[in-house]
Image (cartoon, grey):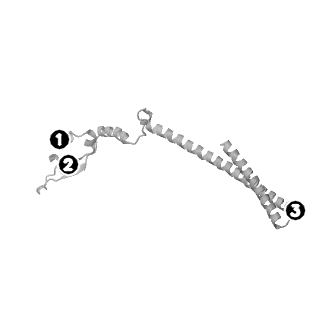
Amino acid sequence: MAATATLSPLLQTLTLRRVPNELPTSFQPRASRPSAPTTTSTVAAIPSRRRLLLLIPVALTIGERPSMAEDIPLFGLRRGLRKAEEKAEEIVREGFEAADKGLQTAERGIETAEKGIVAAERGIETAEKEIETAVSFDGLAQAGAVAGAEVLGVLVATSIVNGILGLETQKS
């Protein structure tokens, strides 16, 4: 019992006490047989109203509460980290949007270049046909005219591609 005097009221309320398993002498029936040896058993002590009154605030303080430390400037690291994460997410989102716009612009440029190349090829084919019909030379002259037309077509296609890519680099 001396050990429980040094314990806190909460622990005193929650501790188990050893209580003798016999009735007080005033309640003992008078029997002709000898009484059995007394045994002690461990029973949970029922706390009084005062002890229960102490347990209510303890139970309330034990419950989980949201931390208010982020409002203190010294401990506001969590709030700062949250703001930094939001800014980083926004920057990443803007980067993805810019990359998507860049890809769309590059796709449009490539499509335009492909259309220009197809048009140049048609022009070369048309020029070859006109040259074949207009000039009916022997095989060597015809080969020279075709080579010249192809060189002209390559020059036209190259200038078209350089013009498109030149505009792209100036925009960026």
Q: Which mark is residue 18?
A: 2
- 4 and 77: which is toward the camera: 77
Position of residue 141 relative to residue 17, above or below, is below
Give the labeled residue for mark 1.
2
Task: Determine the residue located farthest toward the bottom in the rendered image.
Answer: 139
Kind of element beneath mark 2: strand
- For the C terminus, which image quadrant? top right
**Residue 107 numbered mark, or none:** none
What amino acid type should be assigned to the residue bearing mark 1? Ala
**Mark 1 and mark 2: Cα distance apart in space:** 13 Å
- The type of residue carrying mark 2 is Arg
Q: Position of residue 53 (x, y in %)?
A: 33, 38
Depth order, front residue of 54/158: 158
Within-10-Å neighbours for mark 2: few <14, some 14–19, many 20+: few
Which one is earlier in the sequence, the residue at label 2 or at label 3?
2
Can residue 148 be seen in this snapshot? yes
Point out the tag, 3 or 1, that comes first from the N-terminus.
1
Q: Is residue 126 left or right of residue 158?
A: right
Q: Nearer the viewer, residue 91 or 114?
A: 114
Which residue is at a point 75% across and 53% down the rendered structure image? 155
Q: Report x, y in % for residue 10.
A: 28, 41
- Number of on-image labels: 3
Where does label 3 land, which residue?
135
Q: Secondary structure at mark 3?
A: loop
Rounded to the nearest angstrom, the CA distance separating label 3 from label 1 is 128 Å
Locate residue 109 relative to residue 61 in the image: left or right: right
Counting other residues with Cα less than 10 Å from the Cα at mark 1, is it few (<14), some (14-19), or many (20 or more)? Answer: few
Q: Position of residue 87 (x, y in %)?
A: 53, 40
Query: Answer yes or no: do the residues labelled 3 and 1 have beta carbons within 8 Å?
Result: no
The amino acid at mark 3 is Val
| Rendering coords of residue 90 (x, y %) | 56, 42
